[in-house]
Image (cartoon, rainbow, N blue to C red):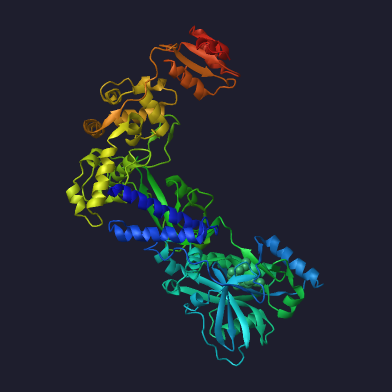
Amino acid sequence: MNKIKIQNNYKEKISYINKLNKFYYDKNKPLVSDREYDDLKSEILKLESKYKFLKSRTSPSQNVGYKPSKNFKKILHRAPMLSLANAFSEDDLINFEKKILNFISKEKDFKLFYSVEPKIDGISASLNYKNGEFKSGLSRGDGKEGEDITNNLATIKDIPKKISFKDFPEDIDIRGEVFIQNSDFEKLKEKFANPRNAASGSLRQKNPEDTKKIPLKFIAYTFGFEKGLKLKKQSDYLKKLSEWGFKINPLNRIIYGVKNLIENYNAVEQRRANLDFDIDGIVYKIDDFALQKRLGNVANAPRWAVAHKFSSSKAISKIEAIEIQIGRTGALTPVAKIKPINIGGVIVSNATLHNEDEINRKDIRVGDTVTVERAGDVIPHILSVDKNKRPKESIKFAFPEKCPSCGSKTIREFNKVTKKNDAVRRCSSEDYKCEKISIEKLKHFVSKEAFNIDGLGKKIVEGFWKLKLIQFPQDIFKLDYNKIEKLEGWGRLSVENLQYSINQKKNISLERLIYSLGIRHIGLENAKLLSKHFISFSKFKSLSIQSDYEDLLNIDGIGETQVNSIKSFFSNKMNIRVLNELEKILIIKNAVQNSDNGLLKNKTFLVTGKLNGISRAEVKSLIEENSGKTISSVSKKLNFLIIGEKPTKKKVDYAKQLKIKVIDQAEFLKMLNKSS
Ligand code: IVH
């Protein structure tokens, strides 16, 4: 096997093991047996020791987050570990309280006192103490049966190993949450999606030494089985826990009345981003143990407690900075850097601010307390600003008038089509003069849908640019590999691999090449249309000398916006130089030419209205396959107007006026010797 094959085989194994990890940790759905997993892992380790050049940041040899043994002993909880019912609104809380009052036959004005405790988003554990000694610890498991993770729990400093207070019960299961602090998670964020996953992964390591590497914390809040606990209230129990040497939550409170609960909930939600532990809601427990006992449980949750959850799509945080990102088309996009906050399991630290108008409309400023929304896969954005929380010294955000990268003037172009000023402000520099734009253009050039150069990712492009190894697209094909080999992180093999994949990509289709140029408004689809139209690179390039741009409007799908953008691309000398250089280096495949002697040769068509059982796209490709052309408007150049259901009257009238043949679907298909 050659080196590239070895490396590809290794990479495949790494990506597969990471997929298995993901399913195991994040989704709790193991895809393979333990045996299969262990075999794969040892194959990877063997490969690494045989071939020293194999390295991966996500290899099990580098990672403490790899699969723990699932062979922990299962042990029955002496009292089940229950879950909690959820509440999301004030109404839910009113109902919760009403049900309790009904159950215990009390009037509406009866004061129910709650132990109010932030709900830490971690992993619950049950610790057994006999005569003050930590004996064993279980995970929650399915609530009835947990895993014996005693040795791993024993590595946690917050868990007292010996308690010598006289009033400490002779036998008790102390329960609480194992979690990782946000500040500690910072160092692990590459490996885990959120602090909860990090805690869960490390708590269930096979080897307690691996657990020890991660700074886990423990906060106590309840108990299971007990013998000798002489207390009347949850709040007293929490106080005692602290006296006995356990950590308890500093935000625990005793509160009565739904209104006060809501007030506290809002206040804690405001502080959430500043806490060093992740909370996903607040737990309310009836404080009085006797009342708890009377109320009992429903199914697997107590009737006397509820978890008031925070929204899983919104959270409050603070804007620490507003950064301006520059895209490959020069667009300046403002991004809010916010204090990291967990929104529905994902740590969010950036929110898009869209554009200048959006910042002005909402008057968004650095230092503002804001509500951030993260819905689905959409980039998080700012929903609203809490102006009451605005610091006195705050100043209005001034959108840069000069490009932060190259200092050129920034402009908001007048859009001839919409007759409005563009919402986006752009750097006005000529192509390849602005550092940020150039880098972004190069990243686009090598991206998946463009040249798709393996081993030349975004970070490497940035690095090469800074070292002046690449400045223009053509430089990618003239890299100084000797120089690269001497750079840190590079070796002979990786350089050979890079050279190999770059050389391989010298063969390129016209449509990919057009796309990779990053012409504004020319995405994949438009690049395809242009390549079909021009067929060869030289014809495409001739746009720089001949200026029949109007003709491009006849390509269905290409409008004035695209044509203007193509025009401005070709009016730039630097772009022409890039094209000339690329032409020298690359082998550009012509677009597949449709038969040029088909039934519809030299005929142009336009469709108006809905056709029956055949899509516009299909008609278009039928026409093209038969050497015809589709155009986008009625003009003297049009030969046939095909009308379907509800055609545009204006088009039909104009076509008739120009004496253009108006045909229906059947007539069109007949021209192709097809029946409808
Ligand atoms: S009490 C019967 N108190 O929330 C009461 N749970 O859905 C059961 N949690 O598995 C637990 N903070 O992991 C309780 N102060 C707190 C809590 C808390 C977090 C978690 C715990 C439990 C889940 C219940």
* Residue 60 drawn above or below residue 126: above
* Residue 175 drawn above or below residue 354: below
Where does the image place residue 479, in percent across and percent down from the top left? 21, 44
User: Could one spot residue 204 in this view of the protein?
Assistant: yes
Q: Quadrant of the C terminus?
A: top right
Where does the image place residue 172, in percent across and percent down from the top left? 62, 83
Q: Residue reaching furthest right?
A: 105
Number of numbered discs: 0
Q: Quadrant of residue 143?
A: bottom right
Where does the image place residue 603, in percent across and percent down from the top left? 43, 11
Ligand 1: quadrant of the figure: bottom right
From the viewer's perspective, tell me whether residue 187 is left or right of residue 147: left
Q: Residue reaching furthest top?
A: 659
* Residue 668 drawn above or below residue 93: above
User: Could one spot residue 347 in this view of the protein?
Assistant: no
Where does the image place residue 402, in percent across and percent down from the top left? 31, 46
Q: Residue at x 23, y 54 (%)?
A: 491
Q: Residue at x 53, y 79 (%)?
A: 247
Q: Quadrant of residue 98?
A: bottom right
* Residue 42 drawn above or below residue 482: below
From the viewer's perspective, tell me whether residue 593 is left or right of residue 484: right
From the viewer's perspective, tell me whether residue 97 is left or right of residue 469: right
Q: Quadrant of residue 307?
A: bottom right
Out of 131 and 309, give the one closest to the viewer. 131
Q: Residue at x 53, y 58 (%)?
A: 30
